[in-house]
Amino acid sequence: MKRGGDSGFIDFLPFSVTPDQRAFQEFFTAHPLIVREHLEAQAEHFTVVGQSLMIDSIQINSYHSSVVADFIRHQLLEQAASFTFETVMSDRSKVDFIKRAKSLGYRTYLYFVATEAPEININRVAIRVGEGGHNVNPDTIRARYHRCLTLLPEAIQASSRAYLFDNSGSEAELEVEITDALAVEYKFDDVTEWCSSAIDALERLATHP
């Protein structure tokens, strides 16, 4: 996102996306994040010009950035393009997106990385802050940690293939590979608790969808 002061633009060209004004404004005003924060009226500050989204007289925040990124993903989905995206996955909308992609004929691949406890993540954020990086409230980290693990079984179920990595140590280790939410291949005899819990929940989903 390129901007100067309270204005700027986003270039859609690298994503091969050519949206129109109406499509963007409808997506923006109906987006759950925008509705929740009562930001619908701000749609008038965004104008699609060619393959750029012009932003005028408004301070860009994380909500705007999240919605624009989501808009690009949905545009790519409609174009049947191959793409990858990264997410904390602490919101159900991300799992719903994977489900929609699969229903449209996509082969979906999930690379999920977690740690054994949220305190590990909190400590790493503190180290990042000490090195000049941005901070995240510890309560937010804990909440996101538990929400994403709760959503994990459904995300696996919607994936053609899922890879679960534990990143508690100095390097991430692949613990489990799951194909079509059915074939489970363990890479170690003993896997972390969060990983085994996800597989147990996946099996329950298969039995009681």
Image: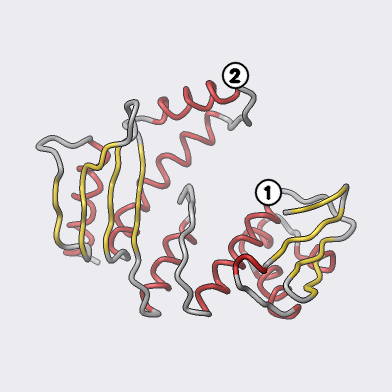
Cα–Cα gap, marks 2 and 1? 22 Å
Using the image, determine if residue 106 lies above or below residue 155: below
Task: Say which residue appears at 25% left-offset and 67% top-offset.
Answer: 209
- Residue 130 badge: 2
Where does the image place residue 148, in percent across and percent down from the top left?
A: 41, 47
Position of residue 77 in the picture relative to residue 58 (left or right): left
**Amino acid at dot 2:** Gly
Q: Secondary structure at mark 1?
A: helix
Label 2, secondary structure: give it. helix
Q: Position of residue 59 (x, y in %)?
A: 82, 50
Image quarter where the N terminus lies is: bottom right
Residue 66 image point, x, y percent? 63, 55
In this picture, residue 140 sits left or right of residue 61: left
For the residue carrying disc 2, how many other residues have a C-alpha within 10 Å: few (<14), some (14-19), or many (20+)?
Answer: few
Res. 71 image quadrant: bottom right
Q: Give the side of residue 51 with respect to residue 104, left or right.
A: right
Which residue lies at the image location 72% right of the left edge and 73% below the top edge? 51
What residue type is disc 1 on?
Ser
